[in-house]
Amino acid sequence: MWWVVAVVTAVVLVATYVTWTAGRVDRLHARAAAAYSALDAQLVRRAATAVELGERAGLADLPPTAKAAITARADERELAENDLTHALREVRPAADAPEEIHESLRAAAAASRRVALARQVHSDLVRDARAIRRRPMVRVLRLCRHHPEPHFFDIDDPTLELSD
């Protein structure tokens, strides 16, 4: 009779562990999707700041580059964001430029820092979600079948150096 209790206990423990792992898989994928949404929002804010900076500073190439980053298709998004990062790095206002241009440049630098932070959070969550997808039990039981595999958003470090 003791073996029945042992088998039932083992089944309950395995079922509890599988349920907990399935919940963790769902939570990690949901957090990775939310982190991508937050990253996307920060990228859009940075592009809007870049458009404003370009218009205030009279830079002809910055607003189109920023608008291209906003309207890029998903498969072209990383390249467009890299182009925007490079364009923002090239902005060097003159020392006697109006204060509003320096203010816009500081806003672009702050937006770039927020993009870098959002990208780091997203990368950490994607790494964790991919790690749990590789576990043998998750693969055998197909616990990820309802979730697309999350992908990294690989762009150059978007932080800007200010020369104030």
Image (spheres, rainbow, N blue to C red):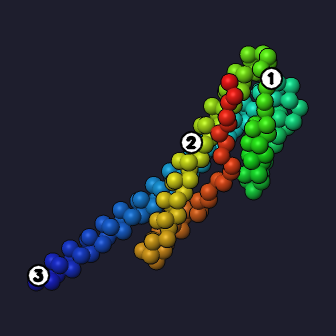
Q: Position of residue 144 (x, y in %)?
A: 51, 67
Q: Is residue 84 visible?
A: no
Q: Which mark is residue 135?
A: none
Q: Which residue is rendered at x = 20% and y = 73% of the image?
A: 9
Q: Which mark is residue 94?
A: 1
Report the amino acid beneath label 2: Leu
Check disc 2 and report its element: helix, strand or loop.
Answer: helix
Q: Is residue 105 visible?
A: yes
Check disc 1 and report its element: helix, strand or loop.
Answer: loop
- Name the residue carrying label 2: 117
- Name the residue carrying label 3: 2
Q: Which residue is rendered at x = 42% and y = 74% of the image?
A: 137
Comparing 134 with 110, the one in front is 110
- Name above or below for residue 154 compared with residue 136: above
Q: Which residue is rendered at x = 78% and y = 32% of the image?
A: 91
Q: Position of residue 67 (x, y in %)?
A: 80, 38
CB atoms of marks 3 and 1 within 8 Å: no
CB atoms of marks 2 and 1 within 8 Å: no
Q: Quadrant of the C terminus?
A: top right
Q: Position of residue 114 (x, y in %)?
A: 60, 37
- Name above or below for residue 81 compared with residue 163: below
Of the two numbered discs 3 and 1 on the same chain, state the one appearing first in sequence: 3
- Tag 2: Cα neighbours inside 10 Å, few (<14), some, or many (≥20)? some
Report the amino acid beneath label 1: Ala
Q: Which residue extends farthest left? A: 1
